[in-house]
Amino acid sequence: MCYSAEEAAFLAAQKIDDLLVAYPTVQPSDLRLLRLMLDQGTRIALVVDSPDQIERVAGAMKGAAKPFRLLVEMDMSLRLLGGLLHLGVRRSPVRTPEDLARLLEGSRKHPSVRVVGVMAYEAQVAGLGDRNPFKKLLNPIAALVRNLSVKAVAASRAKVPEVFKAAGLALEVFNGGGTGSANLAASEAALTEITAGSGLLCSHLFDYYSNIRFEPAAFFALQAVRSSDPGYVTCQGGGYIASGEPGWDRVPVPCLPPGLELVGAEGCGEVQTPLLVRGGITPELGGPVLFRHAKAGELAERFNDYLLVAEGKSPARAKTYRGLGLCFF
């Protein structure tokens, strides 16, 4: 799964095949890249959610030896009170089996493209923790939203194969789920694949779910550089903030040595992060403080390498996109 056409082109150049660009694009430069990959024999698909997007992609693919593959994004948000209450993220206007059927029928006008699947991401389940220590009063509401959504999402997704069958199309790819709902989505027979990103690293945001348990697998170290007052230590850097609704659950948390807490008035700053020492070990100046990040993306955006440590052996290094000098925006 890729974020952009440029990322897909980079991965294709590394001989990685079977790529999905998970966000729509109609930029001419992107469409030229996708056409080039198609002509070179790369197995690639693009997510769309509107007739206009399909028409533009189809125009770029005219004359190709085979149709370009498309997935339709279906919105899995929970909408109550006739749509007045929207719970989830705002992604696609395709919300019902009828919407999907109309888009599939409209795609038939364009022989240069072929719809082969669906993406249906339930953000209000996968991205909403119900045991969040930073939002204790909202946890019961989050649990209710998640429970209602799991049933509604499963019922909606179960209808997708029927829509494809009625349209005479093969459902090759049906993508759903996320880190926070991986075990729930796995029980749905309709899905062919489940996406999980942060779960591979177990960033701390995913400690706050009742339905999943992961072992923390990624940390970053900051240097302790000063002590402004007794009981305080300040680290260099640290402002690696996760995407999403702003809040304390989106900032890194100190984990080693134990007994360190962020200072509420400053949090994690771009140039410094002060910590309160509560009965634990005070880090020596120049020594490391280990933190956990909130989601999967921040470390790859901020650091050039991952150090891969296993069984106490000397760490190997793996370059991030940043370390390779790449930026796909």
Image: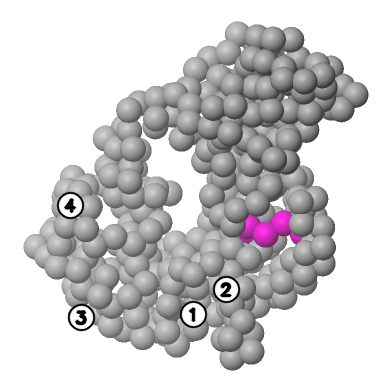
Which badge, 1 or 4, comes first in the chain's sequence?
A: 4
Query: How many residues crowd around disc 2 within 10 Å: few (fewer than 14), some, or many (20 or more)?
Result: many
Q: Amino acid at mark 1?
A: Arg
Q: Nearer the viewer, residue 104 or 81?
A: 81
Find the distance from the CA under tag 3 to the CA under tag 2: 29 Å
Query: How many residues crowd around disc 1 within 10 Å: few (fewer than 14), some, or many (20 or more)?
Result: some
Query: How many residues crowd around disc 4 within 10 Å: few (fewer than 14), some, or many (20 or more)?
Result: few
Q: For mark 3, give the secondary structure.
A: loop
Which badge, 2 or 4, comes first in the chain's sequence?
A: 4
Q: Nearer the viewer, residue 232 or 102?
A: 232
Which disc, if any, is residue 95?
Answer: 1
Find the distance from the CA under tag 3 to the CA under tag 1: 22 Å
Residue at the disc numbered 4:
29
Residue 92 occupies quadrant:
bottom left
Task: Give the magenta-colored segment's residue range.
Answer: 126-130
- Report x, y in % for residue 75: 50, 73
Can residue 23 be seen at all in this image of the molecule?
Answer: yes
Q: Residue at x 67, y 73 (%)?
A: 149
Q: Residue furthest left?
A: 63
Query: How many residues crowd around disc 3 within 10 Å: few (fewer than 14), some, or many (20 or more)?
Result: few
Q: For mark 4, give the secondary structure.
A: helix
Find the distance from the CA under tag 1 to the CA under tag 4: 29 Å
Q: In the picture shown, does residue 263 fall above or below 156?
A: above
Residue at the disc numbered 3:
109
Query: For the residues carrying marks 4 and 3, which lies nearer the camera in this image?
Result: 4
Q: For mark 1, give the secondary structure.
A: loop
Can residue 202 be seen at all in this image of the molecule?
Answer: no
Q: Residue at x 55, y 19 (%)?
A: 307
Contact between marks 1 and 2 (CB within 8 A): the answer is yes
Contact between marks 3 and 2 (CB within 8 A): the answer is no
